[in-house]
Amino acid sequence: MRIITDKDLSPNLQRILSVMDHTVLFHSEYGLKHPSALYNSSLGKIENSLREFLEIYKKYKVKDFENLERESTPILMKNYRDLLYCFREHLDDCFHVIKSFIPKPLNEKQDRNQYSWLNKNVKNLVKNLFENISEYKKYLDDIVNELKHNNASLCCVAFYDSNDGSQNCLGYFVANVINDAFEPITKIHAKVGNTYTAFSFRRDLIYNIVNIYNLSEQIINFIENEIGINLNKLNPVTQMAPDIKKQLFRDVMSMPRIHFPDEYSKDVPSLSITEDEKLKLEYPSMLSIKPNRLNRVVVNHSGDGHTREFKIPYM
């Protein structure tokens, strides 16, 4: 997957929706917002949530990990949990956008869940699109469902050198009490041998961002190939991205290019700003990541006052 935006650094779908002819839209029939308004609001929530997380992350010190009385770790994890929720809500918003291009079926099968509605009413129409995003949807569904509905916890984990902590890699894992032990959930974090694993923030963030832009391209393909709308006739206006938006991506790119041990065997997602001020996203990419010479692991989580056994990532 390789995607290059225009100079606004936004998903290409955002510009297309802004100039879409209202005669090909059916959002009013379903009582939905205009897809452009819905999509803009959804991206805005993600940007705001990402900015809040990065502001805490940039101030974070690994030594904060070792004192549970400090507030920075709980705030960091709360912000990242909120960001994960925004990524999942964006999927639902995109299902609303897709629905806006579909005339109301004569024998409509009602369902409040838009993904299920599309599967019930126009399964063949969305088959290719759903297959192309299935891996990403499952990744988000597994995480958000465990956190929202199964009382799982989002826990922070850090690798760092044993000296002053100046070299570090932070991330998270989703855990719950399983067979009387608090441990990472393996359908989210696959075990490597007998070792539990986690997700590093940098890789996880870029993976999500790349998939948001890929989802944009998948919807564009759906509009062109399944709905049959010629998008070449549209002439959206492109504006330069504001500095605050450029800085948001640069903050992500500036996170240490270090991964957790098991992630070195995975494909690497990447994003960069090109010389002509466009955003380039690739997955898998040829981006080099620095060797992991970090030799100490620290985990931060809150106990429940009952569970006494803990199975910790990379230990």
Image (cartoon, rainbow, N blue to C red):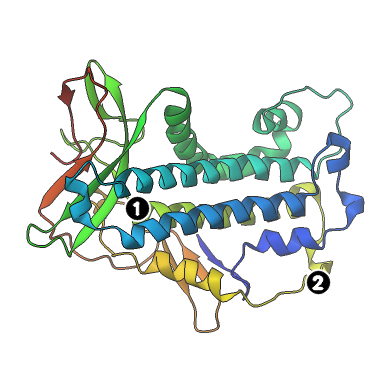
Q: Is residue 104 visible?
A: yes
Question: What's under tag 2, amino acid-wise?
Answer: Asn
The residue that disc 2 covers is 235
Is 164 or 195 nearer to us in this picture? 164
Q: Position of residue 146 (x, y in %)?
A: 42, 28
Q: Position of residue 218 (x, y in %)?
A: 63, 52
Mark closer to the chain start, 2 or 1: 1
- Above-or-below relation of 277 to 177: below
Q: Is residue 267 visible?
A: no
The residue that disc 1 covers is 201
Tag nearer the camera, 2 or 1:
1
Location of the C terminus by quadrant is: top left
Q: Residue at x 18, y 45 (%)?
A: 67
Q: Residue at x 80, y 49 (%)?
A: 34
Q: Residues within 10 Å of mark 1 (few under 14, many from 20)?
A: many
Q: Position of residue 158 (x, y in %)?
A: 22, 50
Image-based side of 222 in relation to 91, left or right: right
In the structure shown, which secondary structural element does the residue marked by tag 2 occupy? loop
| Residue 111, image quadrant | top right
